[in-house]
Image (tube, helix red, strand yellow):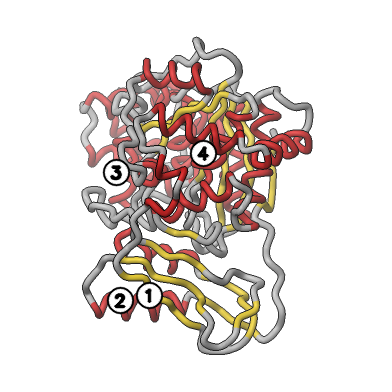
């Protein structure tokens, strides 16, 4: 079998066999297939696509391209969630403890962020001492003991995806839905959980810009997961404005903790309730989503969700005094208010623009080797649907940057991210769709 023949077959619109896809994945991981041939096949897939069976086979071959995590020694049903990424998305930090407090076993491998802000690991590392590099044995033991662990992905899990992800990023092939689906699902399947909830985001601040494209991706991933014997479901959530009020690492951790005390922003609390209810149903703990949502609300009201977060922080070496007393998190040296220039009602907030400003202030990475400033970010004071008066604060910039031109530009760009209309506006529902099978 020759790689050039596989490239030409897909270039001409042919359907790749399981043997051909397996040959490609194995050669990619072993280094026998050079990057230029892998890139050529990725471009052919971008233009010609893959059918569902091809995508399922590619996902399965990628899943087994390295180590897979055996969670069979964990008592009960293990659950996992994945977000396709969005501005202000701190969901796992609050949702994980909530579902664990209700009896589910959340065994989650997360990544670091590239772009708007840090990923879940970067956010958790704003808690001094928090250790994300557990061994698999420690990971499994902790989930068995307290029902919850969030750790970094090991280099031995899904090495095919790591190579393909890097190539897609530099060859203009990121936007292929089969490649996105196989990338996400191969990692989730290799991580070993029995159930997976996908949070597929759409809008200006998300990778999928329209509801229709997000739904197409979500349905494909759900079918792949269920076809490979995992209970896989998806919610579709809007990213036409940032999630919650906080954008930035320690700012988001503080918001997640406040939410566990019942004091979170409306949209974030809605997401926790709905996603948590579905995950408890998947775990067999409740008989309906509505019952699951009630259990999530109870875990907030009785404090068991917060206590579970404390357990995880302690178990993973973090200084729990920071979650007990949020004032211990250091604030950025500069907190710059950005004011409204007219009266009206907030009709839209450009999430992407807010995220990019936060990144430039130090909250995210433009390159993987950039160092994150955990205290940097943006705190929104007005959201879509809010009434605003001229001179009122729309948002605050939190930064340690000294470059005055950067600060001036950031203030202008973040103000421009807000659209203010004369007519009253309705706050949007954050969860716009649910795919159960």
Asked where in the image residue 103 lies, by quadrant, the reply is top right
**Which mark sits nearer the N-terminus, 2 or 4?**
4
Seen from the viewer's position, the closer of residues 44 and 226 is 226
Describe the element under mark 1 as helix, strand or loop. Answer: strand
Considering only order in the chain, which callout, 4 or 1, is on the residue closer to the N terminus? 4
| Sequence-wise first label, 3 or 2 | 3
Position of the C terminus, as image quadrant, is top right
Q: Which residue is mark 4?
A: 82
Indicate the position of residue 402 as horizontal and vertical percent values: 22, 72
Taking the spot 65% from the left edge, 24% from the top edge, the residue there is 283
Asked if residue 80 is positioned above or below residue 273 in the image, the reply reads above
Q: 10 Å neighbourhood of mark 4: few (<14), some, or many (≥20)?
A: many
With respect to residue 427, does 72 lie above or below? above
User: Which mark's residue is nearer the viewer, 3 or 1?
Assistant: 1
The earlier-in-sequence mark between 3 and 1 is 3
Circles 1 and 2: CB distance less than 8 Å? Answer: yes
Lateral position of residue 230 relative to residue 154, left or right: right
Q: Is residue 145 above or below residue 197?
A: above
Work out whether 4 lies above or below 411. above
According to the image, label 3 marks what residue?
167
Residue tagged 1? 336
Q: Are marks 3 and 2 in contact (CB under 8 Å)?
A: no
Give the CA separation, mark 3 to mark 4: 22 Å
Residue that numbered label 2 is attached to: 407
In this view, the mark in front (1 or 2): 1
In the rendered image, is residue 300 in sight?
Answer: yes
Q: Earlier in the sequence, mark 1 or mark 2?
A: 1
- How far apart marks 2 and 4 lie (CA) works out to 34 Å
Q: Say few, some or many: other residues with alpha carbon within 10 Å of mark 1 (under 14 / 14 to 19 / 20 or more).
A: some
């Amino acid at each position: 079998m020759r790689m050039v023949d596989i490239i030409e077959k897909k270039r001409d619109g042919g359907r790749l066999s399981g043997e051909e896809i397996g040959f490609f994945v194995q050669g990619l991981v072993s280094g026998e297939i050079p990057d230029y041939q892998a890139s050529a096949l990725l471009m052919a897939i971008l233009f010609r696509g893959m059918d569902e069976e091809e995508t399922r086979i590619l996902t399965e071959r990628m899943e087994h391209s390295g180590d897979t995590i055996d969670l069979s020694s964990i008592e009960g049903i293990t659950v996992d969630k994945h977000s396709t990424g969005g501005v202000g998305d701190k969901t796992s930090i609050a949702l994980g403890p909530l579902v664990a407090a209700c009896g589910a076993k959340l065994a989650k491998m997360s990544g670091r962020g590239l772009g708007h802000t840090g990923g879940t690991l970067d956010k958790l590392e704003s808690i001094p001492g928090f250790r994300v590099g557990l061994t698999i044995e420690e990971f499994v033991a902790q989930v068995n003991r307290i029902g919850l662990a969030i750790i970094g992905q090991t280099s031995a899990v899904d090495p095919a995806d790591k190579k393909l992800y890097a190539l897609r990023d530099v060859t203009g092939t990121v936007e292929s839905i089969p490649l996105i689906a196989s990338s996400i699902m191969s990692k989730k399947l290799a991580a070993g959980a029995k159930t997976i909830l996908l949070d597929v985001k759409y809008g200006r601040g998300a990778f999928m810009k329209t509801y229709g494209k997000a739904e197409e991706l979500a349905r494909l991933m759900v079918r792949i997961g269920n076809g490979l014997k995992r209970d896989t479901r998806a919610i579709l959530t809007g990213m036409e404005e940032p999630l919650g009020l906080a954008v930035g690492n320690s700012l988001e951790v503080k918001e997640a903790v406040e939410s566990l005390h019942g004091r979170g922003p409306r949209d974030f609390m809605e997401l926790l309730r709905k996603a948590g209810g579905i995950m408890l149903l998947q775990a067999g703990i409740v008989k309906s989503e509505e019952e699951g949502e009630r259990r999530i609300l109870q875990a907030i009201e009785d404090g068991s969700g917060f206590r579970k977060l404390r357990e995880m922080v302690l178990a993973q070496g973090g200084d729990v005094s920071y979650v007990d007393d949020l004032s211990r998190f250091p604030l950025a040296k500069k907190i710059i208010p950005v004011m409204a220039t007219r009266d009206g009602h907030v009709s839209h907030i450009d999430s992407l623009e807010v995220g990019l400003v936060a990144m430039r202030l130090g909250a995210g990475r433009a390159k993987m080797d950039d160092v994150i400033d955990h205290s940097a970010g943006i705190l929104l004071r007005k959201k879509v649907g809010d009434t605003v008066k001229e001179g009122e604060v729309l948002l605050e910039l939190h930064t340690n940057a000294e470059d005055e031109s950067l600060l001036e530009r950031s203030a202008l760009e973040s103000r421009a991210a807000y659209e203010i209309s004369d007519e009253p506006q309705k706050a949007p529902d954050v969860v716009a769709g649910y795919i159960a099978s």
